[in-house]
Image: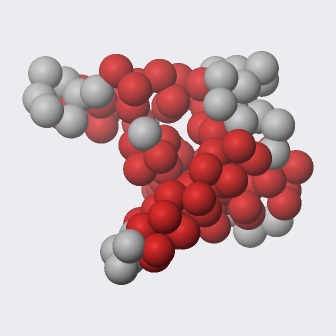
Amino acid sequence: MLTVTHGAAELLALAGALGVDPDRFFEVIGGGPLDMGYLHAKADLVRQGRLSPASFAVETAEKDARLIVAAGADHGVRLDVVAAGAERFRRAAAQGHGGQDMGASYYASFTP
């Protein structure tokens, strides 16, 4: 879930920066294995500005991601992607999005 949430956030941020319509991406993946309802749901929250109330807040997602990383480390497993995701959540929270839905990791794509 965390990886898909960050993927949606980065997809929208990059598409916006490049002037590409994100609907084109969703057309391309339509009907394939990447056409996940969860991906659509998180992207739609960002696109429609409906990040509050949160179904799962940025602050909570960051905490959980850090706990997952620690659990892996305790058992000799490095979870680099989850650690990077925890950092994205931290940046979004630092920008004032901690209480919003974790889709607000979108804002971590931009320098404040």
Is 110 placed left or right of 1 in the picture?
right
- Please say if 48 is above or below 109: above
Residue 53: x and y in percent read 77, 20
Residue 14 visible in image: yes
Q: Which colour scheme is used?
A: secondary structure
The answer to which quarter of the image holds residue 87 is bottom right
Q: Total of numbered circles in the picture?
A: 0
Residue situated in front as seen by the camera: 14 or 94: 94
Quadrant of the image occupied by residue 73: bottom left
Q: Residue at x 42, y 68 (%)?
A: 72
Residue at point 34% right, 21% down? 37
Along the line of sight, the residue nearer the viewer: 97 or 31: 97
Q: Which residue lies furthest to the left in this view?
A: 32
Q: Quadrant of the C terminus?
A: bottom right
- Relative to 71, residue 25 above or below: above
Residue 107 screen position, x and y as percent: 69, 51
The x and y percentages for residue 63 are 68, 53
Residue 70 horizontal/vertical position (percent): 54, 69
Rendering quarter of residue 39:
top left
Residue drawn at the location 64% of the way across and 39% of the way down: 102
